[in-house]
Image (spheres, rainbow, N blue to C red):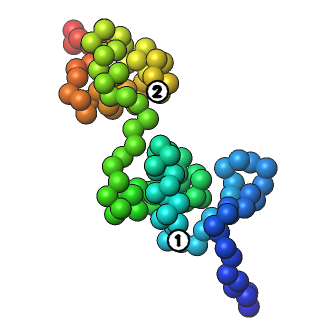
């Protein structure tokens, strides 16, 4: 029989030399005060999840319950500005430090048409 012991996960413990390998808190245990603190420091869901050792999905669930809006990694006004200058999704992504796919997704949300070459049916 395995004896269960309670472990304090307020400070995450590294379980290897790999920076992403940490001891995870018990399922459903998220320090909401720490979540809010990290959120107010400007961290996004992924970054908060890494710091607290839980999934992005868990952070998103708790953030929504707390009434905190999504933290965006890119400035949408800057994206629009670069788009209006005629830059491609790839170039905009390079300037903002994100992938082309991220730009495509935000561009679609902003209802901005693609500047990429359109394949024509022959």
Q: Is residue 109 left or right of residue 56?
A: left
Tell me if 5 is positioned left or right of 37 in this view: right
Looking at the image, which is closer to me, 120 or 113?
113
Q: Which residue is mark 1?
A: 29
Which is closer to the viewer, label 2 or label 1? 1
Q: Which residue is drawn at the image coordinates 49% and 58% (left, top)?
A: 35
Please report the residue visible at 32 percent of the width from the left and 28 percent of the height from the top. Answer: 76
19 relative to 83 in the view: left or right = right
Q: Is residue 12 above or below residue 103?
A: below
The numbered disc on residue 40 is none
Q: Is residue 10 above or below residue 89?
A: below
User: Residue 11 location, x and y as percent?
Assistant: 67, 63
Look at the image and tell me in which quarter the N terminus lies.
Answer: bottom right
Crowd class of label 2 (few under 14; some 14 to 19; many from 20; radius 10 Å): some
Q: Quadrant of the C terminus?
A: top left
Quick one: SS at disc 2?
A: loop
- Label 1 packing within 10 angstroms: few (<14), some (14-19), many (20+): few
Residue 67, percent across and down? 31, 58
Element type at mark 1: loop
Nearest the camera: 54 or 121? 54
Give the percent coordinates (x, y) of residue 116: 32, 14
Task: State the residue in front, 62 or 121.
Answer: 62
Report the number of discs: 2
Label of residue 99 in the image? 2
Task: Tell which residue pokes out farthest to the bottom in this image.
Answer: 1
The answer to which of marks 2 and 1 sits earlier in the sequence is 1
Seen in the picture, residue 42 relative to 95 is either above or below; the reply is below
> Residue at left 43%, top 14%?
91
Residue at horizontal 37 percent and vertical 18 percent from the top = 89
- Residue 101, image quadrant: top left
Image coordinates of residue 46 in percent, x first then y, are 50, 47
């Amino acid at each position: 029989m395995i004896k269960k012991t309670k472990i304090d996960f307020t400070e995450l413990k590294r379980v290897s030399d790999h920076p992403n390998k940490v001891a995870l808190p018990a399922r459903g245990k998220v320090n909401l005060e720490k979540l809010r603190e990290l959120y107010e420091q400007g961290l996004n869901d992924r970054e908060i999840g890494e710091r607290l050792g839980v999934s992005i999905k868990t952070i998103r669930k708790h953030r929504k319950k707390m009434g905190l809006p999504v933290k965006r990694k890119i400035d949408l006004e800057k994206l629009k500005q670069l788009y209006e200058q005629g830059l491609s999704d790839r170039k905009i992504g390079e300037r903002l430090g994100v992938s082309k796919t991220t730009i495509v997704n935000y561009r679609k949300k902003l209802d901005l048409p693609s500047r990429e070459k359109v394949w024509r049916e022959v």
